């Protein structure tokens, strides 16, 4: 990649870095020599990340960015471009889960889930892409989920948002490729991070109010899920390593299902795990 205002180091902008996958991804990229801009909605939570980076001898720059706010997205991207001259890699990682069926999900719950998980990705990509297109290079990596391929009960709003990101990026990838920019999706199965605890906390009031027939069904679902996470869950650093490998790959795949267990979940629906066949077919139409 060409030089930036910071020298030869490529610049990465990562959303949702206060905890979980984003936290570990920022550390991985800093260790790999990237100018690492770690964004988070609440910058008062930056201390653990900065201390961890400092202890390892690396530098991370924290930027306030709320993906659910178009104004915040535009302002943050403008600041990053002004300071560093470019963004070589965008990692759409910020996300929020929610547990509840269609009947239990309020409009506010639905809008919040869609704003963070889908519209946040849309607005970030739209804000960052023009300078990549003008340079003819760049990488856009979005963390979705097996829930973006396989709908799951009590995850209707979350899966709807992740399905939307999958459709957006699958449609966008051939166009981006023609302009020198690669697009990839990271699709984890169960991950043992703070994300799961946060989902349960934000959904606790709704779950407690479940009545028949949902109360017994959610209990069974949650019990089975706990066993799956305990046996098959990956770590945030596991996913961060896959994201870094994707950013550094000479020719990255469109889709990365992150574990054998996750592949078994989506196997009935996905024949080509890489997703390249769909992107290649539509890219060929643009030649």
Image: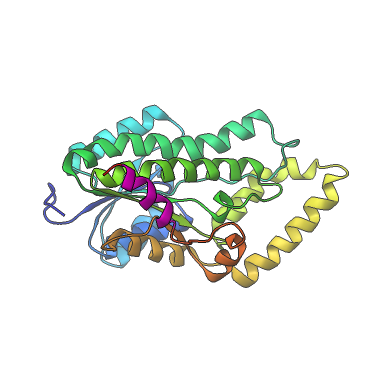
Q: Is residue 43 above or below residue 195?
A: above
Residue 136 seen in render: yes
Quadrant of res 123: top left
Give me the residue at 78% from left, 51% from top.
Answer: 218
For the C terminus, the image quarter is top left
Residue 279 included in the magenta stretch of the image: yes
The x, y position of residue 81, in whole percent, is 21, 39
Give me the residue at 80% from left, 58% from top.
Answer: 220
Give the farthest residue toward the right.
Answer: 212
Residue 283 included in the magenta stretch of the image: yes
Q: How many marks?
A: 0
Looking at the rendering, the stretch of residues picked out in magenta corresponds to 275-285
Residue sitting nearer the eye, 222 or 246: 246
Q: Is residue 40 above or below residue 256?
A: above
For the N terminus, the image quarter is bottom left
Is residue 19 shown left or right of residue 108? left
Residue 85 seen in render: no
Quadrant of res 98: top right
The x, y position of residue 101, in whole percent, is 73, 41
């Amino acid at each position: 990649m060409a030089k930036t205002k910071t020298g030869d180091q490529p610049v990465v902008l990562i959303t949702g870095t206060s905890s979980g996958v984003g936290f570990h991804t920022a550390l991985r990229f800093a260790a790999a020599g990237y100018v690492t801009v770690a964004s988070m909605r609440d910058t008062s939570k930056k201390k653990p990340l900065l201390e961890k980076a400092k202890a390892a001898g690396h530098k991370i720059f924290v930027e306030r960015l709320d993906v659910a706010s178009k104004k915040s997205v535009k302002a943050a991207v403008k600041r990053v471009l002004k300071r560093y001259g470019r963004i070589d890699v965008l990692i759409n990682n910020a996300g929020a889960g929610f547990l509840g069926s269609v009947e239990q999900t309020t409009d506010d719950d639905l809008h919040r889930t869609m704003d963070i998980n889908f519209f946040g990705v849309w607005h970030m990509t739209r804000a960052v892409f023009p300078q990549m297109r003008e340079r003819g290079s760049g990488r856009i990596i979005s963390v979705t989920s097996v829930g973006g391929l396989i709908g799951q009960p009590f995850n209707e709003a979350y899966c709807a948002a992740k399905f939307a990101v999958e459709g957006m990026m699958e449609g966008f990838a051939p166009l981006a490729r023609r302009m020198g920019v690669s697009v990839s999706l990271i699709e984890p199965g169960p991950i043992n991070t703070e994300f799961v605890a946060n989902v349960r906390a934000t959904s606790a009031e709704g779950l407690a109010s479940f009545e028949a027939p949902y109360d017994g069904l959610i209990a069974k679902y949650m019990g089975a899920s706990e066993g799956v996470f305990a046996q098959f869950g990956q770590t945030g650093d596991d996913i961060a390593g896959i994201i870094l490998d994707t950013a550094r790959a000479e020719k990255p795949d469109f889709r990365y299902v992150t574990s054998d267990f996750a592949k078994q979940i989506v196997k009935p629906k996905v024949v080509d795990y890489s997703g390249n066949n769909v992107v290649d077919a539509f890219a060929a139409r643009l030649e």
